[in-house]
Every structure is written in C-alpha cells, then in structure tokens.
Image (spheres, grey):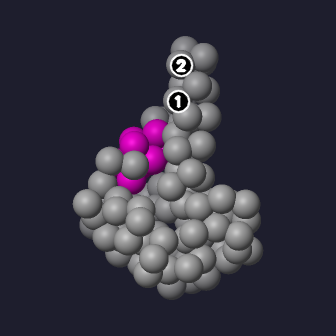
Amino acid sequence: MVEIPLDLSSHCIHTEIKRLYNRTLSECLGNPDIDDFAEERLELLKHALELFDFPALRAKYRELAGGTDSAVALLTDDAGRIIIKMDGTVIEPTCS
C-alpha cells in the first residue's frame, strides 16, 4: 500500500497531485537507481490525474479546494483502489 501526503495549504488537490507527479517523474528520470517506492508513487499519481473528476471533488469537499490545514493523503486500499483520506475519513473519489 502506497500513501502520499498532500499539502493543500496553498493550492487545490489537482495542483498538488500534478506538482508531486512532476517532481517524482524528474527524480525518476534523473536517477538510474530509482527505488520501487518512487515508481509506485509515480503510478498512483498518474492514475489519479487520469481518473479523478477534480472539479466534482473540490465542489463536494471544500478542504480539497485548498487553503486548508486538514491532513489529506492519496493512497491505495487493500483492494488496490485509489482513495483519499482526509482527517482520517476515507473518500472514494469521483472519477471522470
């Protein structure tokens, strides 16, 4: 199971996931000896970017629109589904 903390204090969930995806991709491309965790994170972030309906998520959960200090994380559950955890509550994201 992969869990990626998201910092939504200054921007929305979509921007944060794009930012983390680009950073992780750069790390992977710049390092021939990438670890499995980096590859798993990259795949999780990529799938979230491809599948999530970000406008619907931001509309339904104000905290995901940014400007919050809520504890938010992107992760996979035991069944391999991508979920969001916000202050301990599990959110099954709306997909486009």
**Label 1 crowding class (10 Å Cα cut-off): few <14, some 14-19, many 20+?**
some
Residue position marked by numbered label 2 in the rendering: 29
Please state the horizontal and vertical placement of residue 93, each as a whole percent of the image.
36, 70
Q: Is residue 73 magenta?
A: no
Q: Give the left or right position of residue 58, taking residue 8 as reference.
A: left
In this orientation, which residue lies closer to the viewer: 94 or 32? 94
Q: Name the residue located 52 percent from the left edge and 44 percent from the top edge.
A: 18
Residue position marked by numbered label 1 in the rendering: 25
Residue 40: tell me if it is visible.
Answer: no
> Up-down: is 24 above or below 48?
above
Quadrant housing residue 23: top right
Q: Give the left or right position of residue 50, taking residue 54 as reference.
A: left
Span colored in magenta:
40-48
Please state the horizontal and vertical placement of residue 49, each as a whole percent of the image.
39, 49
Numbered badge on residue 38: none
In this orientation, which residue lies closer to the viewer: 52 or 40? 52
Q: Which element carries disc 2, helix, strand or loop? A: helix
For the C terminus, give its image quadrant. Answer: bottom left
Please name the amino acid that badge 2 sits on: Leu
